[in-house]
Image: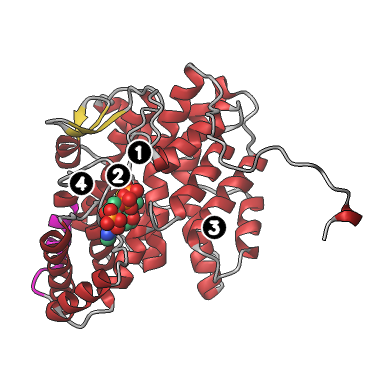
Amino acid sequence: MSNNENSAGLAGVTAGKTAVCTVGKKGVGLTYRGYLIEDLAAKAEFEEVAYLMLYGELPTQSQLDAYKQRLIGMRGLPDAVKKALELTPGDAHPMDVMRTGASVLGTVEQENDPEAQQHDVADRLLASFPSMLLYWYHFTDSGKRIDVETDDDKIGGHFLHLLHGEKPSADATKAMSTSLILYAEHEFNASTFTARVVTATLSDFYSAVTAAIGALRGPLHGGANEKAMELIQTFEDADAAEKGLKEMMARKEKIMGFGHRVYKTHDPRNPIIKEWSKHFAGDDAYKRNLYEISERIEQVMWDEKKLFPNADFYHATAYHFLGIPTHLFTPIFVISRLTGWGAHIFEQRADNRLIRPNAEYVGPEIRDFRPIDQRG
Ligand code: ACO
């Protein structure tokens, strides 16, 4: 590990080894266990990628079929989790609901023997995250206790089915699958690193995941897709967006969904999700306008600051066009990233050492202690 005085935010510091993923590797971009993100997004289903992340290799057809059936069988929620979700206020942030759901599940189905249980726990969380989110969403929205089981064998389609109460189109299911693949893994990002720090203390899988959800919630990380949507919707049209953006930049405001710690010229996930956003905008005047606003923001950011959209920016309109409420955007990231977190938790456990760096002390020198009645 380098020990660089200028490494605020650990920028540029190599903090460990991983065989799971490369980010920004020269000439390659983003890979999951050696596979290019472009290949995975175009040719794989999310469940194949989830299997790759959690079991180390792409599945054969029969392994994939069995894995999907296994996940379908793990979608139900224990009564304790349902009760906790019913008690969670409707105005809670859905990321807090995910964190709470994961935590309560961890008290009911405890991980006491990581070696024997860790794959079951990972699959259980992956399968039941959509159930937790949408059970809470419908209960607090309309008092309805939905059935969290559907016959959709793809998690993305299942999510949309639970949300809208009807089977999604093949296009919508494919777009969700692609989105889940794009969000699945990203090396030592803030939430994954958080999961590894917790894991390294020999804590349980649920604790690592709840901590990771907390890290992902912030707008500098996963929360950026929600903030990007809010921004896009403040503008009437593309010209207004250009004017507004320039004013924001003059005020040195951060534009969410742009920039990246590791990528310097582009984010390889962006063109893939941008294409889906464009596809769903189609000829619809309302959607087309939002898409054009997004493109103008992209243009202005590049012209003015050489900043490019990251994975979050076009996810905003893509999800919006799928009828997903904005405050549910980041929880979808959780569903997907659980697979990457899981891969890193397993990797950390396989070769563990406590993660405990040093700090450079910048506080006062040793001082005399004065009893409380002598302090003024
Ligand atoms: N809008 C405006 N300016 C920006 C942006 C942005 N989105 N991102 C970076 N900059 C500018 C900074 O103001 C800074 O300028 P300065 O040197 O003149 O002060 C410079 O670029 C470097 O930015 P830092 O914030 O120091 O870069 P860092 O590597 O620490 O942060 C981060 C990376 C957090 C992603 C940053 O680009 C950002 O805040 N982006 C917006 C939030 C976002 O989209 N997060 C999602 C990340 S990707 C993901 O989670 C899928």
Few, some or many residues within 10 Å of mark 2 (<14, 14–19, 20+): few
**Circles 1 and 2: CB atoms closer than 8 Å:** yes
Amino acid tagged 1:
Ala
Q: What percent of the width, then of the height, locates residue 59?
A: 28, 26
The response on whether ligand 1 sits within 8 Å of label 4 is yes
- Per the image, is 279 magenta? yes
Q: Mark 4 and mark 1: span between their CA atoms? A: 21 Å
Q: Residue furthest top?
A: 351
Q: Nearer the viewer, residue 316 or 297?
A: 297
Residue 269, numbered label: 4
- Label 2 residue SS: loop
Task: Tell me how the rendering is colored.
Answer: secondary structure
Q: Mark 2 and mark 4: span between their CA atoms? A: 15 Å
Q: Which residue is mark 2?
A: 261
| Residue 135 to residue 216: above or below | below
Q: Which residue is mark 3?
A: 97
**Circles 1 and 3: CB atoms closer than 8 Å:** no
Q: Which residue is mark 1?
A: 11
How many numbered marks, from 0 up?
Answer: 4
Q: Earlier in the sequence, mark 3 or mark 2?
A: 3
Residue 156 visible, this orientation: no
Q: Mark 4 and mark 3: span between their CA atoms? A: 27 Å
Amino acid tagged 3:
Val
| Residue 45 to residue 115: above or below | below
Few, some or many residues within 10 Å of mark 4 (<14, 14–19, 20+): many
| Residue 127 to residue 331: above or below | above
Foreground tag (2 vs 4): 2
Stretch of the chain drawn in magenta? 273-283
Amino acid tagged 4:
Arg
Q: What percent of the width, then of the height, locates residue 131?
A: 48, 53
